[in-house]
Amino acid sequence: MFHIALSVSRAPLAVLIVGSVLQTIFVDGSNANCPGSGTLGDPYCTIQTAINASVNGDTIEVAPGTYVENLNLAGKSISIESRDGKLATIIDGSAAGAVVTASASETFALDGFTIRNGSASSGGGVNCILCTVTLTNSTVSGNSAVIEGGGLFVVFGSLTIENSTISGNSASSYGGGVSSYGSTAAITNATIVGNSVSGYAGGVSNYGGTVTITQCTISGNSAGLGGASYTIFGSTTNIKNSILWGDSPNEVVGANVSFSDIQGGHWGTGNINLDPKFLDAAVDDFRLACDSPCLDVGDPAVNVSPFDFEGDDRVVDGDSDGTATPDMGSDEFDALWSLNGPPVVGSPVSFTAQAPPAQSGNVALVFVSLGNGAASDGVKVPASGGQRLYIDLGFLFGLWSGLPAPVRQVTLSACPGSTTAPVTIPSGTNVGLRIFYAGFTVDGFGAVPSVTPTHSFVTQ
């Protein structure tokens, strides 16, 4: 049997409340029995209703859908999580105010949402005053602020951003993407792109606080000064293992930068000034190509997250030199895949693979997904939102000549080339394609002399 071990990188906010029983409250906008009662069988129809019914320490689980709401935490310290991830679960502010507003020392977490179309004087996406907010596995996009913090605005509080995208937000004075005022902010594995401000810091502004930016990709932002980052005198901004490229009119003002790729150069240990070779920045694909100079040149002493922004393993020996060191930026390079058109049952679809250096000859295994979201032998695979997939290679090799077998095996070419191959999805399937790259080599007799698993990838 084909074994997959699945773990979910989701940590609900835990607060001990004496005399209270913490609970999970359910929300599903498609429930016809509005307003609902918040149970699994009769969920609330809106997120705000669930917030109002919650107590400190509760978890709110939100089903897929678009929720046109302007949320107010109303003094609650809670965790709000989507069930199926940010692509399926959208909170739309309808330009009627900030999408999420918090204050009064609230501590809350948002996990797995797209936060869009908010508009406020400050903090169009998230407005946090005297509070603590953690944003994970989410996208904050297309929000605006009259003054500062088009995407997120935190005042005299604490902000944590992990494995998220901040894009296409705008403001007039400070921080098109993120504005931190007198606060502590830690931004890790984030992609901050295409934000704009007339004044300072298209990407991230720091006024009177401490901001740490680690393993991030900041690109295509614009400002009057400090396209990527601007730090007001007296603040501290530390940027590590990151890529700041293609921002205008310049990249960074007033920050301490190390082991990062900075367009135009910047003082600091380990910094470079080389085209990072994004896979396709024109279509917002900021993954690294196999010959990127940002592979394996980050600071190994930095306590990096075990996964990159896609959920891929970090740290990986991306340049195949025998030593695994973190890459710069939010992406940890391994094998790159793309599908050339949507898969259709009974028709060929091509996928393109770009292998790590010195790994030509490795084999890609292509499995077909069934209608229930399972792999070709019926084992469930993850869909999105920080979930992980692992292949038990010992069992996998036992299937090599048996059933269920991969629908195709493809030998990869060397970097910087790519391999394109057609795959026909058999009848009886109705979802799509999963590509599993196990990173092993087979000899001419089909044996497996050495196993070096490097990557497992899931796509639709």
Image: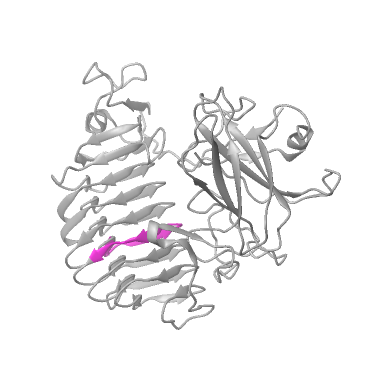
In the rendered image of this protein, does residue 86 appear above or below residue 454?
above
In the rendered image of this protein, does residue 18 appear above or below residue 87?
above
Residue 357 spot, x, y in % from top left: 66, 63
Q: Residue furthest bottom?
A: 267
Residue that appears at 59% across and 28% down? 426
Q: Is 195 included in the stretch rendered in magenta?
A: yes
Magenta stretch, main secondary structure class: strand
Whether residue 175 appears in this view of the structure is no
Residue 125 spot, x, y in % from top left: 24, 50
In the rendered image of this protein, does residue 439 appear above or below residue 435?
below
**In this orientation, which residue lies closer to the viewer: 47 or 404?**
404
Residue that appears at 29% across and 60% down? 178
Residue that appears at 25% across and 25% down? 45
**In this orientation, which residue lies closer to the viewer: 342 or 35?**
342
In the rendered image of this protein, does residue 25 appear above or below residue 154?
above
**In this orientation, which residue lies closer to the viewer: 443 or 332?**
443
**In this orientation, which residue lies closer to the viewer: 346 or 195?**
346
Give the residues in magenta: 178-196
Quarter location, residue 123? bottom left
Q: Is 191 included in the stretch rendered in magenta?
A: yes
Residue 221 spot, x, y in % from top left: 31, 66
**Left/right of residue 122 with respect to residue 66 in the rendered view:** left
Whether residue 396 appears in this view of the structure is yes
For the N terminus, the quadrant is top right
